Image (cartoon, helix red, strand yellow):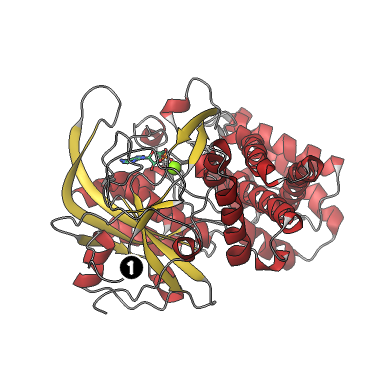
Amino acid sequence: MPFLNLVPSSFALDLPGEERILPEPRQVRGVLWSPAPPEPPPAPALLDWSAALAEDLSLPEPDVDVIAQLAGRWTHEGLMPWASRYGGHQFGNWAGQLGDGRATVIGALRDRHGTMQDLQLKGAGLTPYSRHADGRAVLRSSLREHVCSEAMAALGVPTTRSLALVATGEPVLRDMFYDGHPAPEPGAVVTRVAPSFVRFGHFQILAAQQENQLLEALINHVLTRHYPGLGPPGPEAWTALFHEVCRRTARMVARWMHLGFVHGVMNTDNMSILGLTIDYGPFGWLSDHAPDFTPNTTDFAGRRYCYARQPVIAGWNLARLAEALLPLGLDLDALQAGLEAYQETYATEDRGGMAAKLGLAAHRGPSDDELIATMWTMLEATQADRTLFHRLLGRVDPAVSFDPAMMAGALPEQAGDDARQALAAWVMRWQARVRADSWPDVARRTRMDRSNPLLIPRNHLLLEAIRASEKGDNRPLQRLVAALRDPWTDRAGIEDLVARPPAWAADTPGCATLSCSS
Ligand code: AMP
Ligand code: MG
């Protein structure tokens, strides 16, 4: 395989772009993308290759040429890589033009299901949208994106994917703790893969600059290429598209909440028009349940993007998208109905997802709401690990007196009698509730085991993989990615990946909490 056999991406085919090749940061008008040839690094080295995604794309193991291509070597023949123009609200404020500041789409491939997938290099150099930054990415943040996006896919969360993690061999200067001490770090490039990287912010910048013809071209591109079932271009289909984005976003956020994922930077430029989790930055995973937890140190004061606020923020972001669609002449009430569909879908997904996690035959309304609310309160108070608690709950026999020892692995070592009793009291309520279903045990347990993963890419596992890879040992990284391909099945040899985080994980910088420096 000398080079990937890429074809043009539909975004660049359908929509106008700039003609000149000039990476100088600037305000771009009247087009949706700019040519952005990647800057080839000196010594590319493959750190991990996602075999799962490669299979979907029918790609064999990559050779040196492909690795160089995925690090940013550009052949200057055929396809022109491009960076797209978008804007967005950052932390609630309109930020104007943002755009792909360090990402460039090198082309597309058809996957085994017939879907065209764009390949985007993140960290491959300057683009017109780089603003004051360098267009590069460091190994630690790239590794986190690579592992987490592949894990999310295996966990059934809609997400952009990562095909490869390639070290560039070039140092990148970063002030990791924002304390005035920039230091060189190893650089890396992630190959992101998605049918489309269009964000809410793509629509917003066009509405803000009153480029209404382009706005129409953009929505028609998204409609015809990615939502073809919604009918021919026109207000009816555009409204249906908005409703569908609302529903997909609701499903995505409900999955995050049930797994304990905190995105960390839910700005409108980080919201996908396909309802995919996108832009893995200072994200984090909850161990003990902490509603106001945010992994993002920049958000410590306001906690705008903390765990519990994610459903509200997604709704707020959808409202900004609705505003951006108003210049198309869409009916305000119809758009409002989309936002209501978001709320309804979220509520339905939340109830259904929780019923599955708890092994209930069906959610029975207010009494089950109460059981679930009590569970979250208990988990917060006892500091039980959410993931282990839910997994172990599936092992509890509703017909047999509950033995608290079997949940010991979920509780912190220092847990006292109070915590053990509170946990046992809730589990006994759950046993009574499950007995009332008179559902076969096997069916219940199977459902629970498909809803409660054993494995999630825990913050400390990511940090351990980063530390090893920074020293040239990629085995922990590769082992982690391989294990996370199947987060559901209990098996020997993964005990250390399943266990509660060690005590140091809570307060080590770069583990549970991170800056945006990436
Ligand atoms: P993010 O917080 O990662 O969503 O990024 C916000 C904006 O900053 C986007 O327009 C990014 O493309 C841009 N950006 C972030 N890091 C860099 C970088 N190192 N070089 C250029 N642009 C960047
Ligand atoms: Mg972003």
Question: Hey, which quadrant is residue 1 in on the image?
Answer: bottom left
Residue 2 percent location from the top left of the image: 23, 78
Name the foreground residue: 448 vs 182.
Answer: 182
**In this figure, what is the number of numbered marks?**
1
Residue 127 percent location from the top left of the image: 31, 47
Name the foreground residue: 162 vs 289.
Answer: 162
The residue most toward the left is 42
Residue 340 to residue 164: above or below: above
Q: Is residue 322 left or right of residue 299?
A: right
Residue 274 to residue 429: above or below: below
Question: Hey, which quadrant is residue 422 in on the image?
Answer: top right
Residue 83 percent location from the top left of the image: 38, 52
Q: Which type of secondary structure does the marked residue at label 1 adopt? A: loop
Whether label 1 lies within 8 Å of ligand 1 gets the answer no
**Residue 496 visible, this angle:** no
**Residue 239 visible, this angle:** yes
Q: Which amino acid type corresponds to the residue marked 1 in the rendered image?
A: Leu
Viewport quadrant of the C terminus = top left
Say which residue appears at 74% left-offset and 46% top-offset: 330
* Residue that mark 1 sits on: 79
Say which residue appears at 44% left-offset and 43% top-offset: 29
Say which residue appears at 36% left-offset and 34% top-offset: 504
Packing grade of label 1 (10 A; few <14, some 14-19, many >=20) is: some
Residue 57 percent location from the top left of the image: 43, 74
Q: Quadrant of ligand 2?
A: top left
The residue most toward the top is 301
